[in-house]
Amino acid sequence: MTDTARRKGDRLLEIRGLRIEARNAAGDWGEIVHGVDLDLNRGEVLGLIGESGAGKSTIGLAAMGYAREGCRIAGGSIMFDGIDLATASEAEKRGLRGARIAYVAQSAAAAFDPAHRLIDQYAEAPVRHGVKSRAEAHEEAKALYRRMQLPDPDRIGFRYPHQVSGGQLQRAMTAMAMACRPDLIIFDEPTTALDVTTQIEVLAAIKDVVRQYRTAAIYITHDLAVVAQMADRIKVLQYGREVEEAPADEMMAAPREDYTRSLWAVRHMEKPEAPAPALDPVLSVRKVSAAYGRGMTVLDDVSVDLHRGRTVAVVGESGSGKSTLARVIAGLLPPVSGDVLIDGGPLSPTLAGRSREDRQRIQMIYQMADTALNPRQKVRDIIGRPMRFYLGLDRAEVARRVAEMLDMIELPKAFADRYPGELSGGQKQRIGIARALAAEPEVVICDEVTSALDQLVAEGILKLLMRLQREMRLSYFFITHELATVKAIADDVVVMRHGRVVDRGTRAEVLFPPRKDYTKVLLSSVPEMNTGWLDGLLAARL
Amino acid sequence: MSAAEDGKAGAETRRAFRMPPILVMVARRLAIGVVTLFVVSLIIFFGVELLPGDFAAAVLGQSGTPETVAALRSRLGLDVPAHIRYLNWLGGLLQGDLGYSLSGEIRIADILGTRLFNTMFLAGYAAVIAVPLAVGLGIVAALYRNSILDRVISTATLGAISFPEFFVSYVLVLVFAIELGWFPSLSQVSAGMGFGERLYVLFLPAITLTMCTTAHMMRMTRAAIINLLSTPYIEMVRLKGITPWRVVVQHALPNALAPIINVIAVNIAYLIVGVVLVEVVFVYPGLGQLLVDSVSKRDLPVVQVASMIFAAAYILLNLLADVLSIVSNPRLLHPR
């Protein structure tokens, strides 16, 4: 048998000319996926990569013959093992879903039904599809939980979703997808919501079971370094069209298209070294401890200095206390002990105790620009409010300054009359920045400001923040869990874990090379842009 | 044993001796309920005092001279100042003594017993029909939302609730009692009546009440379920190839229980306290009718006790709804 002939016989999924339409607010149908072809052989992993809006999730779901509410498959064929899912009946598709094609969602916490135990949700598909009895499914679930290195595999299944951590849930969901031993699994950004250290465990577990059962997979992500670990082939998408497709090694070594190259540009951003100044810090956190409620200590004796015109990056996993530290500085959570000093003078621990001038000096930019902007206010009011409140500017002056601010954040002046709902995610975050800067602060707290954004958009935001820092001598207190971002923007770095400071110093001192074990683990957990990184790392850690 | 282990063991012991959170919540709510009842008793007693007219004058009517009225008042203890009578009444209530009715001077407990049973029986009868019907229709409407079936269900239930309940009663009486003769038009019950016979006699009032309460519960069931159908976990279940019926009943409904339970509780409370008109139409000796009669006769002790029972029913049903909402939510029942 020739090589091509065997390939043909192994073909599991063949999508031709797939077109998907979505209905807009006015009720008209518009095309969002414009004729995409996709081939997948048995046991093969295809990476789908692109920014949000590229149509990757939509295509992934279409591979199950499924379109979300407000979307429809408008044309093309989706041949899964001889069945055209584009035209198959609902009952026929239902017979395949969960049994031969399974789905792993982005947020396991949202995708598990909160009303049922994990193991019952595991058993649901096999029992309903008549593949296994409930008892058999339970036994298998335990075995699979063990293989995926979940803690206490015999009993973890009997917990409810809210009783299990995010990384564990994501593994439990992968196990659930394997329940009927499907031919194909769609992984839809399964590690995007996780910390780097947790991400590794999940990636390793996914890779292990997919290999073990020779399951074919479509792995959807916006992170090239992640897809490089998982996929045999990579397909890059933009605006519902294919940009290019190549075997993973080739794609990583020599992407042909400019767009593909631009996708990892942010990883190459690096702030020039600046020597640590001898001056007194503009903001100083001294031996702060904080707790929520009674007894739950979240911060334990934390000290951080921020110098004028510099950026201190606070890194750590979720639960390390970095956001709590921001709340203490902002006056939202009075600490149990310790002080916050600005320009050497003490700040009141509570917001109510701070003068208007004190509040003006510290402004905040939030992670979710979506929820941090009042949807009923126009951009001009959102940006103009701090000018009136803190600076007491009159109407004409505010209008002039708002136009200036928009210019500064690289948005057209006409945006002043828009509502947040009319802006993209990156534009909203720029408005969030403008609002913080409108108060003319000295210190800006940036709480994971790029985590919710695509890489290209995030890069734009980081570049903007760096430019504004140079022009206005701003000091940034920058909270993030992404080490690529730290490299891009930080002068000084504080590493936190379990509410304590693990290490602090200039970026070079703390990270290059890492001097603390925990920092090493964090750094080594960041996926690198070569296909053998995960295997190499796991081998090294064993 | 190290200090850390010691602390842990201490915490374990404390946990073992602590009441489960749900019992703490029930106890706290019951205590608040008692306080509420006390406030209600004040409002009822002094509110009733403010009513114009007087039992003695009402009984004696035209024939009463000022002397005879005064004599009757003093015999019934109505000449004692109001706050003293309130304290006496409250004291009696706390000892389980409901006092005497002014008319006929019989023990209120004796009248109330059968009346309360009758009211509860009818309310239970109607609830047993209405609740499953409403929840079932709500599920079907959610499953086939925006279809003809959904619209028929919505129109029919909303239509039924739009008519006043006495009107519905009379229409039912006209059709089923007078034209077809299947059911009696009066719901007269006696002490020795069998269970089946009671059900038969009470069929028309129970159906009337069902028609008056279904729409509310049905709409809430439908809305609560539809609200959840766009959540990621419902999409996940669909992508596991589970049938739409199971998706709704096994996955959407359990997560939608809290609002549904609350609306059901409000409706059952209505079935207990709000059915005077239906009782009057069917001449059914329930609590509501007793209350109305007593008000018109100025038989204040009966009014007071009946009102207290209604208030207690509301408080207990609301408590029950809250407890069931917690029990139906694993996040509250099984904390991390």
Image (cartoon, rainbow, N blue to C red):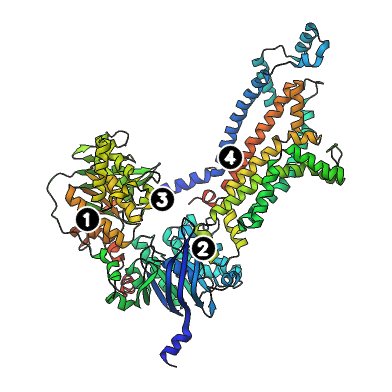
Whole-number angstrom distance, CA of label 2 to CA of label 1: 40 Å
Task: Tell me the SS state at disc 4.
Answer: helix
Whole-number angstrom distance, CA of label 4 to CA of label 3: 33 Å
The percent coordinates of residue A394 (x first, y second) are 26, 35
Q: Are marks 1 and 3 in contact (CB under 8 Å)?
A: no
Residue that label 3 marks: B5
Report whether mark 1 lies on the same chain as mark 3. no
Q: Earlier in the sequence, mark 4 or mark 2?
A: 4
Report whether mark 3 lies on the same chain as mark 2. yes
Position of residue A379 relative to residue B310, above or below, is below
Q: Earlier in the sequence, mark 3 or mark 2?
A: 3
Residue that label 2 marks: B236
The percent coordinates of residue A432 (x first, y second) are 31, 48
Task: Give the residue at the far top of this rendering.
Answer: B67
Q: Earlier in the sequence, mark 4 or mark 3?
A: 3
Task: Tell me the SS state at disc 3.
Answer: helix
Q: Amino acid at mark 1?
A: Ala
Residue that label 4 marks: B26
Whole-number angstrom distance, CA of label 4 to CA of label 1: 53 Å
Q: Is residue A186 left or right of residue B308?
A: left
Task: Tell me the SS state at disc 1.
Answer: loop
Q: Amino acid at mark 2?
A: Met
- The numbered disc on residue A490 is 1
**Looking at the image, which is closer to me, B43 or A494?**
B43
